[in-house]
Image (cartoon, helix red, strand yellow):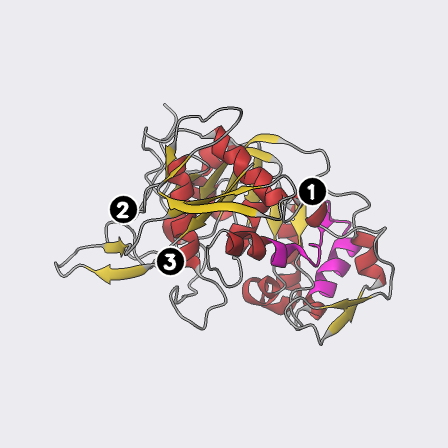
Amino acid sequence: MLLIYLQAAPLTLRRLQEPGSSWNIEDSQRFHLKSFVLKSDRNSVLSAAPTSLVTYRKSKVSSPIPLPGLKSKTCNSSSPEWTFNSTLSNLIRKNILRFLDAERDISILKSTFKPGDVIHYIFDRQSTTNISENLYQLLPTVSPMKNQHYKQCAIVGNSGILLNSSCGREIDSHDFVIRCNLAPVEEYSADVGLRTSLVTMNPSVVQRAFQDLNSEEWVQRFVHRLQSLSGSVLWIPAFMAKGGEERVEWVIRLILLHTVNVRTAFPSLRLLHAVRGYWLTNHVQIKRPTTGLLMYTMATRFCDEIHLYGFWPFAHDPDGKPVKYHYYDTLTYHYTSRASPHTMPLEFRTLSALHRQGALRLHTGPCKLPT
């Protein structure tokens, strides 16, 4: 058995001195794969050696697959050079399954809890909440991803790099489309598409995007957005940190009151630590995984080929033009701040390396319109 991991150097950005020039990504060190050949009981390491090549073993050695460093700042989505590497994709899937099973961990189930049960918050173990009667009603009886499998999936991040991309049709052509934080789509459909199979919703979205439902108008806007999901999975990380429980309860009540056609899911209490553990074990030194990285890690369980859109943790595009943090609002973000709970540029480097290997496809440029 061969276990691989990625090792990445810290990402630094520098501004070229020439006027009108764009951001460059400097890598002081290339990504490396280290291969651990393990005994069948997985407990004893027999050998460990860094290498710039990885060899996949079945019964005999196959052709080596190089993992180059990130030499440029973008992966052009229209590049004809990208080829899907099913061998590497399957290997990643198998390795992730050692840490988590997304079919199971995507949501807690009715059979696991009952009303009144105490939950300790993931990031604040001293604080607790209870499973309310309303929340219990919305717990699934079986995993929303049970026995689901798709050939091609799209995960849509929220970077302003999507604006004027004309990627809407391409995104909607995938068999399964994952979106993040209930981002609006109707006004931006040409660039981001309309189709939604699963969408995440942090409790803070209620405050930031819907003014804490402080008027009937905002309540109606929020209900309209939920109703537009039309049977999609609504993934609510309700037990991450104290402070969002009231908003979670508001959302649940509105879903029940308006009989909104969504399939709610509430991630397992072990999911985030399992995802972080997988990447740390593979020497990707993330802090807290972003929603995008969480979704990619889980999607490997039920998607053969994964395409990422709207992943761009930089303030400028390759031509030096400003890029909004979100395509739909005016929020700003300090991507390299030590105070940030995320390490977005490092995640991007890792995903870029996997793109170059063919394990996933990272779309950062405009999409070709169908002729």
Q: Report crowding for label 2: few under 14, some 14 to 19, many 20 or more residues within 10 A (C-alpha).
A: few
Q: Report crowding for label 1: few under 14, some 14 to 19, many 20 or more residues within 10 A (C-alpha).
A: some
Q: If the image is split into quadrants, where does the N terminus sit?
A: top right
Q: Secondary structure at mark 1?
A: helix
Choose top left, top right, bottom left or bottom right for residue 204.
bottom right
Q: Report crowding for label 3: few under 14, some 14 to 19, many 20 or more residues within 10 A (C-alpha).
A: many
Looking at the image, do the residues carrying marks 3 and 2 touch, with CB atoms under 8 Å apart?
Answer: no
Q: Between residues 224 and 297, which one lies in front from this camera angle?
A: 297
- Point out residue 257 in the picture as x, y percentages from the top left corner: 79, 56
The residue at the point 77 percent across, 60 percent down is 253
Choose top left, top right, bottom left or bottom right for residue 304.
top right
Q: Nearer the viewer, mark 3 or mark 2?
A: 2
Distance Cα–Cα, label 2 vs label 1: 35 Å
Q: Residue pushed farthest left?
A: 18
Choose top left, top right, bottom left or bottom right for residue 93.
top right
- Point out residue 101 in the picture as x, y percentages from the top left corner: 67, 44
Amino acid at pointer 1: Glu
Residues shaded magenta: 248-274
The residue at the point 50 percent across, 30 percent down is 57
Q: Secondary structure at mark 2?
A: loop
Residue bearing mark 2:
72
Q: Is residue 166 above or below residue 205?
A: above
Residue bearing mark 1:
103
Residue bearing mark 3:
324
